[in-house]
Amino acid sequence: MRRTRGSAILFVVVLIAAATTILVAATSLSTNSLEAQRRREDSTTARYAMDAAVAQIMADSYAGTLLVPSSRTLTLGGATCSVVIADNSANISRTALVTGTTTVGSRTFVESRVVAEAFTAQPFYYTVFVNSGIASASAILTGSNGSNGDICSNGSIVLTGGTINGDVDSGGTVTAPTTTITGTTNANTYAINFPSVDSGTYQAAANRVLSGSLVFGFTFGSASTYDLVYHSGTLSISGSISGNGTIYCSNDITISADLTYANSASHLVLITPGKINISSSVRNFVGYLYCGNQLTLSGVGLKNLLRGNFACSSMTNVSGFYATYDPFIWNSPSEAVKLHIPGFWP
Amino acid sequence: MGRGKLLGTTLIELVLVMALTSIIIGTLAGLFSFAIARANHAFANANSLYQARRLLDQVQAVVMNAQGCVALSSAGATGLKCVMPATGTDKDGDGYNDSYTPTGISRRGFLKWGVAKRIWFYTSDSSGAFGMPGTVIWRAQRTDDSLPTSSDADSSWSNYYGGKKQYSLITALQFSTTAAAHTVNVTIAANQLARSESSSSAASDSNSSYSLTLTRTICWRNWRQ
């Protein structure tokens, strides 16, 4: 009788222990699942809060009201997102690093994004810009190692052979079956404004006047405000260029022989509302070239734009050419203003 | 007299109590059975939904960061190849980059990302080689555009520790892409028997199984090289 009673108590104790174990395990499992689900929800909330913060920053950037560096705090759907906006141009030109610290409940999430600073695209940001279409039977080779070789046309582009180290942007179609394009081919893109130039404006602003129509070598002044040289009539130019400055010619320009820089700090801008002809004898040339009419590369054999770019209304590419973009004004657009480049000045 | 009447009453009462008890127990048993059946369906629903959503989220995390995606078929197997940006870091330590930074900016102000590894999602057999018929869900990584082999397949992603399949309830995984819109359409079907934890791929027991199909359209954002 005693043993039977003792067994009953033992059974009850074991059953209660087993039931307690199951209850604790089930509770723990439920709690852990709930916690994991809450963590996922908080992470998602934090990510969306960061997305919203980036969207707001991009909107401010496009509106021209974004301050870099700056910080702000956003409260979105119960999540508080503290955002720090820092200049990232040391890593990637014209970008900002957005670091968001989002607090959801008792948890904190940190996330960083690189965002582009908004700006207006300009013809002089490309190695080659042609306002009308590009139809080149001769090779075009631009840039190197996937950079400094972007080309653009507000019309259609037809390329034959060659290599484009960068993007091909076209307001129409792009036909380049035998061309290597390292970047993105963008057809039917929005048109970039091809600015016009006014001789009177440049003449009035010029600090020097070039009288002769033949230039072999030129040295700009060393003033912090770069020289603006005005020339009336046609101009033939070649030789070594030293310093930073602009030569505005009211009529056509001919690069008659090799045109080079005296040093790596020199930058030349040639502007004409007329035509630019790069003669058949030219092998190397430099500078930011603007022509409101047609640019012609004459002769046989690839010409080499060592450092610069050209923006023109139309282009006739007889010789074929190699061109390397000069990122001087891309990296520092304020220099483009000082160089009186169309689209940046006046 | 009085004693006999009392005994008869006790018998009738006992019969009545037994009958009422039987009715109550029967009702409770029926309710319990119904509740268990509904609970099993709820578990099946939750498990199927959990696996399908989890897989969709994993695919989405990759597609959203991709530079480009393409859906491929081979020998009845379908797969998705995502070309990933050039610069990335592996924050969760699973051997796959999951956070990326741009390589540059276009002349129109768009971020550029470059290209590097290819991450695949596909169905195959237990070998993990692409192009084999099967229902095992695989993730793989390559540095070129070739089809993933069994050595590329990530078994630690497909299986739990011990070898149990992570996505054992997924019965179909299909992809289609729209290149012009930079989008991937992902369709995932999941199925679980309501009566047990085992997977169900046959329609023979459809009354005891729970099936669902999820579809999501995901945009790849980093499409500029």
Image: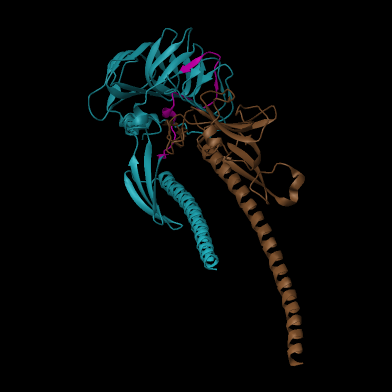
Name the one closer to the observer, B165 or B12.
Answer: B12
Please check the rendered image and state whether residue B65 is part of the magenta-colored stretch, yes or no: no
Q: Residue furthest bottom?
A: B1
Dividing the picture into quadrants, the one containing residue A198 is top left
- Residue lying furthest left: A222
Chain assigned cyan: A
Say which chain is brown.
B
Q: Quadrant of the N terminus of chain B?
A: bottom right
Give the camera-side residue of A199 and B225: B225
- B203 or A201, which is in the foreground? B203
* A303 lies above or below B159: above
Within the image, what quadrant is residue A289 found in?
top left
On whether residue A123 falls in the magenta region, the answer is yes
Where residue A178 appears, as percent x and y from the top left, is: 57, 16
Q: Residue at x 62, y 35 (%)?
A: B136
**Res B84 visible:** yes
Question: Could one spot residue A116 in this view of the protein?
Answer: no
Q: Position of residue B198 (x, y in %)?
A: 65, 45
Q: Residue at x 72, y 51 (%)?
A: B208
The residue shown at (73%, 89%) is B3
Q: Which residues are magenta?
A: A114-141
Q: Compared with residue B114, is residue A316 higher up or lower down, i.e. above or below?
A: above
Task: Name which quarter of the figure residue B119 lies in.
Answer: top right
Which residue is pictured at 38% across the width and 37% down the height?
A95
Left-right relation of A156 to A48: right
Camera-nearest residue between B45 and B185:
B45
Q: Position of residue A229 (x, y in %)?
A: 31, 24
Percent x, y for residue B19?
Answer: 75, 74
Q: How is the image coloured?
A: by chain
